[in-house]
Image (cartoon, rainbow, N blue to C red):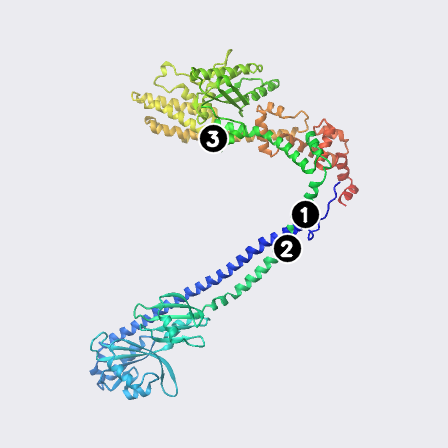
Amino acid sequence: MSVKVKPSYFKSKLFLKYISSYLFVLVVPLVCLTFVLYHNTASNLRAQIEQSHLNQLKQAETIVDTHLQQMNDIASRAAYDPRLSRYRVHDAYYSSEAISALGNYKAASPIIDEMFLYFRGDPRIYSSVGMYDLDVFADKYRFRNWNSDAVDRDLNEVRYTTMRPADLVGRGAGFEQSTLVYLVPIVPNSPNPHGTLMYFVKESSLTNLIDSILGGYEGSSYIFDAEGQVLAVKNNQGEGLNAESLASLVSLSTGTHSVKIGGVPHSVVSVKSELNGWEYVTLMPSSQFFSSVLHIRTFIAVLFSIVVIFGALGAWMLARRQYGPIFQLSEFAGSKPVSALSNESDDVREEAAGGNELDRIRSALQAFSARADLHEPYARNHFLLTLLRHGGDSEQAAGLPESFGLRFDRSRYFAMLIGRDRPEAAAEDAKDWQLMLTMLAEAEYPELGARLHGVELTKPDQIAVIVGFDPLDETDEASQIARIASAVYDHLQGIGRLNAAIGIGTCGSGTKRLNQSFIEACSAFESRTRGVGINLAYFSDLTADAGEACWVSKTVLLKLSQSLKQGSADVAARSIGEAVDTLRAPALSAVYMRCIGFDILNTILKTASEAGVDNLQGCIPSLETFSSPDELEQGFLRLANRICEQVEQKEETEAHTLMDTIVAYIDEHYADHSLSLETISHNYSISMSYFSRSFKEKVGVNFVQYIWQKRMAAAIVELTTTDEPLKEIIQRVGYQDTPNFIRKFKKETGHTPGQYRKLFTDPAGSMKEQA
């Protein structure tokens, strides 16, 4: 009995390294991820805000340009309005119409605060509310930076549309308002204008359009004219900008920029109008963007802390979990082996006796590896069956044949089918048949330059043999094949009274044509002459009769029939091609063509009937196709593909149905001590290897394990529900060797049958076990 030593964690350098490595792997990527996540979030938010500002500023620029264009249009209409002509304005009767017309034009634009009409050289000026003398106008509207003389001069001399910067205008009673003045000479674009149309525009009407862009951010918005003069400004910051800073803003192109103003980084969004060259600018400190992600920063910090805390706990738990087994393993590796497993071989126990537990484990693994090698024949069998069914594949995994001990290094290959007729299958012949399987699994005839690979087929009492050889000097290929077949037959005759017959297919280069050669061997085997003598049937000997010169060759029809039975669609397609080539003979009459086509169709349908395939009515070629070899070939190919698909499905269904029947039989007769692989294989006329492989695929365990599980389950029921003697129970479930059963039962449950009965049928004993 080994003593379990509890490790001291913090005294162990290995444990500290473990937990440090886990924390390092956790914290370093987490810090980098948090840093990148935070700065990415801030940068993305800044880019989104700047892009939003740019879009809003472009929208504001479009609106202002629209209003300015509207005021220019008003000036053009007013210049040609007869109500606003010099004559009618000065006429006492029509002057009221002129004032009313100015009111209507003013109402047409939402940003016009007041509208004035002045005729050059006239002492009076007209508005939407009345007429003023110039001195009265100057007294009513007092500009801080535009005196009356400048007003008189600009009204009389301006030749181009001019927007004056925002200026405070006093309107009496101490009321001042920041207003922009827009002067438009009339007629517009005339070299000798006769008057001036003057608009008053509140500065707030323009700045309010771009003021919403800043939102809750601190900053400023500016409107510059084409000469870089500030027309309007909205400042959310404490101090305005100096002339140098303003000049740096004017020179910016349309877009988003990062500039330093007064040593402080700012984000600037600038848009320039294509209509009049005005520039619209918003300015805000860049530091505001990072304050906008304060809640994200707090969330990331909290999330980082939570992940670190739980990560540290996880690292502690993982380090403890992984360090414990390593500590125990080191203690275990240094200990001496106490006892060997009951199912270990004597060699394993002797080899481990002089070493430690690791030596014993290594020896046990070697023994288990040897047991795993026992499954290699199943994989080899499957590979060879695939080779016979589909031919050699150039893309097959490199080294796969060599891993099964198979070498395909010969230049010529053909297939043979070996079978026997056993109307009454005698169980005593099974040993001779197994001996033949062993002999043909891997055989070589050096004097003939041949190597054989045998594989057992699913059909009872049939073996396929792949033969590879190199041509011998001074010997033709047919003679060499005949010598190889005769040598194999002689060996079979020496085994026992097997009465074997051999079908031999034609030869080809490499393994690509093995599937066709196998079909040919099956055809030769089935068409052989049964009787006394050497039972060797060569497909090449199946020659056509003299009267078949213009008919389909019998060998082609045989090969077509056999390929359909095997479900080999590619070989069937080649056989159909060879058969239909007969219909393309130039001297063949239409009657002969139709008769030959019916013969081919009859062969296909007959084979389908023998294989149990039905429901082919929709696939049979129509009568019209029998006059065209190409159309008939396509119809035959569709029919053959349908038959091959149903043959493969039928084989799979029959295999599953057979296994279901066998499993049901085993479930009913598992208590029969004579039940074995041999008896079941003999009863159901299948080979032992095929049965063993298919049974494991069906139930997940091999035959011996399944029988043991059924018998053990029955024994447990008997032990816990009856008082029958142990020996009678063991014999009743199918075991004759009582000590062997007890040993296996204890290995499986940890208790002998008697202990198991006492533990699970005695309530007091059950409570003790639970305690």
SS at badge 3: helix
250 vs 676: above or below: below
Q: Amino acid at mark 1?
A: Gly
Mark 3 touching mark 1, by CB under 8 A? no
Nearer to me, 303 or 337: 337
Mark 1 touching mark 2, by CB under 8 A? no
Task: Tell which residue pokes out farthest to the top in this image.
Answer: 532
439 vs 696: above or below: above
Residue 304 lies, in percent from the top left, at: 57, 59
Disc 2 vs disc 3: which is toward the camera? Answer: 2
Residue 343 showing in the rendered view: no
Query: Which residue bears the numbered disc 2?
Result: 313
At horizontal 34% and vertical 73% (from top left) the residue drawn is 224
Query: Which residue bears the numbered disc 1?
Result: 324
At horizontal 53% and vertical 57% (from top left) the residue drawn is 32
Residue 68 showing in the rendered view: yes
Nearer to me, 333 or 475: 333
Distance CA(mark 2)–CA(mark 3): 61 Å
Q: Left or right: where does residue 426 sit relative to residue 158?
A: right
Q: Earlier in the sequence, mark 2 or mark 3?
A: 2
Residue 536 lies, in percent from the top left, at: 48, 15
Nearer to me, 397 or 65: 397
Mark 3 surroundings within 10 Å by alpha-carbon count, few (fewer than 14), some (14 through 19), many (20 or more): some
Mark 2 surroundings within 10 Å by alpha-carbon count, few (fewer than 14), some (14 through 19), many (20 or more): few
Disc 1 vs disc 2: which is toward the camera? Answer: 1
Q: Amino acid at mark 3?
A: Gln
SS at badge 1: helix
Q: Earlier in the sequence, mark 3 or mark 1?
A: 1
Query: Which residue bears the numbered disc 3?
Result: 646
